[in-house]
Image: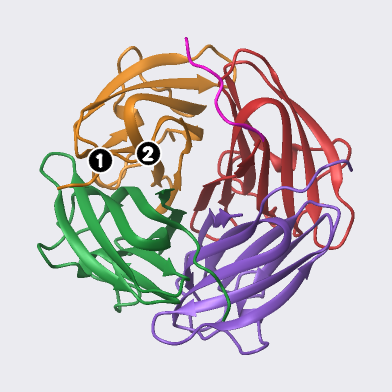
Chain colours: A orange, B red, C purple, D green
Amino acid sequence: MGIAAIGKRRWAIAEGYLPAGPAGASRELSSHETACILNAGERDAHVEITLLFADREPAGPYRVTVGARRTLHLRFNELHDPEPVPVGTDYASVFESDEPVVVQHTRLDSRQAALALLSTLAYGAE
Amino acid sequence: MGIAAIGKRRWAIAEGYLPAGPAGASRELSSHETACILNAGERDAHVEITLLFADREPAGPYRVTVGARRTLHLRFNELHDPEPVPVGTDYASVFESDEPVVVQHTRLDSRQAALALLSTLAYGAE
Amino acid sequence: MGIAAIGKRRWAIAEGYLPAGPAGASRELSSHETACILNAGERDAHVEITLLFADREPAGPYRVTVGARRTLHLRFNELHDPEPVPVGTDYASVFESDEPVVVQHTRLDSRQAALALLSTLAYGAE
Amino acid sequence: MGIAAIGKRRWAIAEGYLPAGPAGASRELSSHETACILNAGERDAHVEITLLFADREPAGPYRVTVGARRTLHLRFNELHDPEPVPVGTDYASVFESDEPVVVQHTRLDSRQAALALLSTLAYGAE
């Protein structure tokens, strides 16, 4: 596949929130918040994620690797090292990668009967 | 945390609307419209917000401070000075900060039984 | 209000669709698709809108004026001149303004019991 | 129609997911994921789409043509050559066009009773 790398090395998501409360019928439909990271290039991307909060010091960095020509749909509630992401708390996130990537933010919320989804491109800066 | 400032100093959200009508079961699930402001830098950001309308002069500026390495999830219906944000009225908003920030726009709507959420990055300009 | 103009003069929304079918309980909750146009500057913005389709020539231009320091939340189903926007048909839209503006795309869909909302910033180019 | 080309030649959507499960009441309301591609220019745009996954090599390229001054609302589940898009699997997509286009990503999800919609501009790079 001759596609070239695309994207930027720094991204920010200003909106973040992990709902507390009961889980959905399955992992697929459970409430979750995801950062989709696309690495279209020929080299693995090493990404450091820092979480920022309203009233405490930032958490992190969390480290993930997105393989060359791969995409990673990262669930924030599966980040545990150096500490879990708190539920019921507003947060924001900053992504710093050693290769160009594209970051998109998506949420599924199953607290009420109806499924709600949102998605938006993160803010990218070189 | 060695992360650097990210973002821009001027942002605009063209779409804004605070629904009137009954509140939800809790503050968390009540209808609201939020501007999430992320300040990843080392200095506090002083942000002035101006609201624009269809058929009257703009309101504001409203002033908020987002601490260094902090995020503020600002609910428009909690802005009261110099005047409350009117409900049931279309508006838009412009953000002017003395430090780089990232602004994302999110709405929760509980007027009907199902929860609806939308979110989108604001338009950023230096 | 000392805010300056913000935005770009050309915008595009690639996704557009006016659902057919029964209206909602009120104008406020009826299905609609909106282009929110913000003009934060000191001069009126004259905007020409062209609609593009899958299998016919474009329609328009439709002309609207957004006053200085005003926002216009334009419903596509209220565009009638030179022709109404067809329902049940995919379309896209291009906005050309003589002043910088910001364009955001929002849809309310009341075809089913639950309210669905989406919103995203349009693509802006100078 | 004197409108000029608008957009970029390379686009990426980091988030992609085709739900498995029962279809909706009609094609219009069935779960689907769409890439809306707008070509406002005077020449046909030839677009190559590559899909990237979490744990296998990319698929594609899929080839589509978007006519001059036309828009194409492409459903991913209607891509079959060189292979169908797998359901229940995270993916991402990269678009490479020989003319400037605008790409927007939209999803309708009818797995549960309520209709959920999301839409966001893709990431564009020259």
Magenta stretch encompasses residue B5: yes
The magenta region covers B1-9
Q: Is residue B58 left or right of residue D79?
A: right
Q: Position of residue A11 (x, y in %)?
A: 45, 31
Quadrant in the rendering for residue B5:
top right
Residue in the foreground of this view, choosing between D77 and D70 = D70
Magenta stretch encompasses residue A105: no
The chain letter for the residue carrying disc 1 is A
- Relative to B57, residue C96 above or below: below
Quadrant in the rendering for residue B110:
bottom right
Q: In the image, what residue type sits under mark 2? A: Gly
From where the camera sits, is residue C93 visible?
yes
Question: Label 1, on which residue?
Answer: A40
- Relative to D37, residue B114 above or below: above
Q: In the image, what residue type sits under mark 1? A: Ala
Which residue occupies 66% across, 35% down?
A: B126
Secondary structure of the residue carrying tag 1 is: loop
User: Circles 2 and 1: CB distance less than 8 Å?
Assistant: yes
Q: Position of residue D2 (x, y in %)?
A: 58, 77
